[in-house]
Image (tube, rainbow, N blue to C red):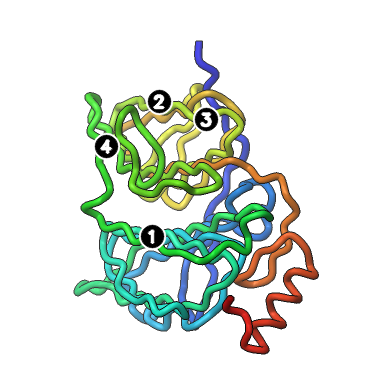
Amino acid sequence: MKNIRQIKRIFTSQTTIEGAGVHLQRAFGFAEVPLFDPFLLLDDFRSCNPDHYLKGFPWHPHRGIETITYVLQGDVEHGDSLGNKGTISSGDIQWMTAGSGIIHQEMPKGDQNPCMMGFQLWANLPARDKMMAPRYRDITAADIPEIHLDNGTTIKIICGRLGEVIGPVRDIVIEPEYLDITVPPRTTFEHKTRSGHTVFAYVIEGQGSFSDDRQAVFGNETVVLFEEGESVLVTTGEVRVRFLLIAGKPLGEPVAWRGPIVMNTGEELDIAFSEYARGTFIR
């Protein structure tokens, strides 16, 4: 019998304000280091009130991390110090490796309703790669494969592999998996996971059970962090559940974190902010 991953911890997202005044739900962040290693933060920005998102995230620096922005509704305009600019639209994802340093802005615009729905995940970089050259991977909705299982479950593969289908984001140092999964009512879904990897689910719609005992049911804006095991088991009742399933290889390194910069030591943080103040941050 397979070793089903049991629930290690449950978190409920907390309301916070970031950027120039963006109201969002923080699923996990600084207080949860190193539980989610190699992941640092997951923010949920869903709102139909433009006052809660239009002020956006004006120009700010990043170093030592990767930011993964997944938009499900509305548009996010972006630009950076390398001259890149564009729009992340419904169903698109942007995987940005800040590496040695980048200064950018992200400005949510919503849609005609006017609603905005998206998620930003921060992934840590190992010490050996923190000063790598910055890069962008802009993936459109059309580039993300979607699998339909016989039991009605649908899976969008942003990063990772299911059978012969591989997601468009590849060659990431933490060997991540990022899936958008919808399980229909009265259905059981099991997904094999890699040994030794951190695995968690973030529920974004409906509700479901995330363990083989089926005792607890979790709904919208809940994070389920799993213990070690071979697979994740999800069961639904009278309503479907949609969740992000995210996994990655832990780094096991010290984390020194201040604002938008994450390094391994306080001295490295001091250097980064000193360079930013002097205008020498960009390599």
Please name which of the two marks, 3 or 4, marks the residue nearer to the observer: 3
Could you give the CA–CA distance between mark 2 and mark 4, rounded to whole angstroms?
A: 12 Å
Instruction: Determine which residue is flagged by label 3.
Output: 194
Taking the spot 46% from the left edge, 36% from the top edge, the residue there is 217
Q: Distance between the residues labelled 3 and 4?
A: 20 Å
Disc 3 residue type? Arg
> What is the C-alpha distance between the residues marked 3 and 1?
24 Å
The residue tagged 2 is: 190
Residue at 47%, 32% in the rendered image = 210
Q: Which amino acid does label 4 sit on?
A: Thr
CA–CA distance in space, label 1 to label 2: 30 Å
Decide: marks 3, 4 in contact (CB < 8 A)? no
Task: Check residue 35 in the rendering and tell me which mark sits there, or answer none.
Answer: none
- Residue 55, by quadrant, is bottom left
Q: Is mark 2 on a helix, strand or loop?
A: strand
Specify whether 154 is left or right of 263. left
Tell us which disc is closer to us: 4 or 1. Answer: 1
Q: Residues within 10 Å of mark 1 (few under 14, many from 20)?
A: some
Q: Residue 154 carries which label?
A: 4
Residue at image position (61%, 48%) is 38
Q: Mark 1 points at which residue?
A: 137
Of the two numbered discs 4 and 1 on the same chain, state the one appearing first in sequence: 1
- x and y percentages locating residue 259 in the rendered image: 64, 72
Task: Give the percent coordinates (x, y) of residue 133.
Answer: 53, 65
* Horizontal arrangement in the rendering, residue 244 relative to residue 74 (left or right): right
Instruction: Name the outermost residue toward the top.
Output: 1
Please tell me whether residue 141 is drawn above or below residue 182 in the rendered image. below
